Image (tube, helix red, strand yellow):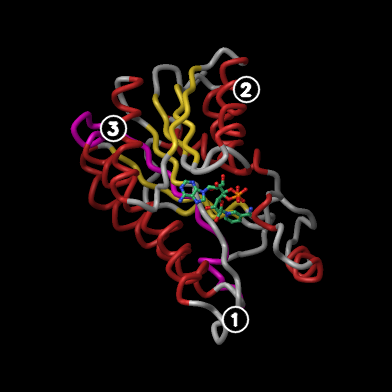
Amino acid sequence: MRFQDKVAIVTGASRGIGRAIALELGRQGASVVVNYRKNQQAAEEVVQAIQETGGKATLFQADVGDFAQAEGLVKFAVEHFGDLHILVNNAGITRDGLIMTMKETDWDDVIRTNLKSTFNCSRAAVRHMMRRRYGRIINITSVAGQMGNAGQTNYSASKAGQIGFTKALAREVAARNVTVNAVAAGYIETDIWASVPEDARQAVLGMIPLKRKGQPEEIAKAVAYLASDDAAYVTGHVLTVDGGMAMF
Ligand SMILES: NC(=O)c1ccc[n+]([C@@H]2O[C@H](COP(=O)([O-])OP(=O)(O)OC[C@H]3O[C@@H](n4cnc5c(N)ncnc54)[C@H](O)[C@@H]3O)[C@@H](O)[C@H]2O)c1
């Protein structure tokens, strides 16, 4: 129960990696705000699952790409649970395509959802965390932001942007005992892969030394480490969890 008395927000937590993170933090004692955009029923099930393990959780609808709604999410967490210690910027989308055919909206939507949301939520959370001299911000990025991926200029740019953001913010807020880290996920089995053709999936699988996809729970464990006091001296770090796909 290492997150007893800790309040956490997980964005995009109704399914996939966000869901696994919310469940893991809740299982270890955190009071969790399960943010979702559209699927209220799935978010309710996550809240219920946390409550069934004895944890505290509630849900909050917000499009975190929207500045005011992201502010509203952080305000809600502080008002509802009385504090905020952990922010996990997980919400993300893909709109893949080669650059010659990529629509302007595909670029804008991905940057807004993946990168601007990270700014939106962090800006609101940092205000509170700096004041109370404690905070853990964890951004879910991707190996695509480290290696680049053909057909994903928008996504790779957003994920590389999150890494730069992580390091810059880590330097800004370190003196107030707020750490900012990122987890760079590899090929993790979630719905985000639904639109990727089978041959492309096999090609990615072929690049993984551990020869398998990762599970959302394996990202959640890494997030839990970075959110814990065990990682008190870790900041500005990108923890790659990818079966060895990207080695630098
Ligand atoms: N699955 C992978 O292989 C993989 C690899 C690297 C990085 N990631 C990153 O992990 C994160 C989670 O992805 P996932 O694989 O669980 O995908 P997913 O599609 O299953 O989940 C993404 C979640 O984000 C939510 N979301 C999207 N836009 C939102 C918005 N504007 N406001 C609030 N919520 C919003 C969705 O509703 C969904 O619940 C993403 O940032 C993704 O880029 C995933």
The x, y position of residue 218, in whole percent, is 65, 41
Q: Amino acid at mark 2?
A: Ala
Nearer to the camera, 23 or 70:
70
Q: Which circle marks residue 49 in the picture?
A: 2
Look at label 3 and name its amino acid.
Lys
Q: Are marks 1 and 2 in contact (CB under 8 Å)?
A: no
Q: Is residue 166 above or below residue 228?
A: below
Image: 157 above or below 235: below
Q: Choose the circle earlier in sequence order: 3 or 2.
A: 2
Image x and y of residue 168, in percent: 29, 58
Q: Which mark is residue 35?
A: none
Badge 3 marks a residue whose secondary structure is helix
Give the mark nearer the N terminus: 1 vs 2.
2
| Residue that extends furthest to the bottom in the rendered view of this protein | 100
Type of the residue with mark 1: Leu
Residue occupying the point 35% across, 30% down = 85
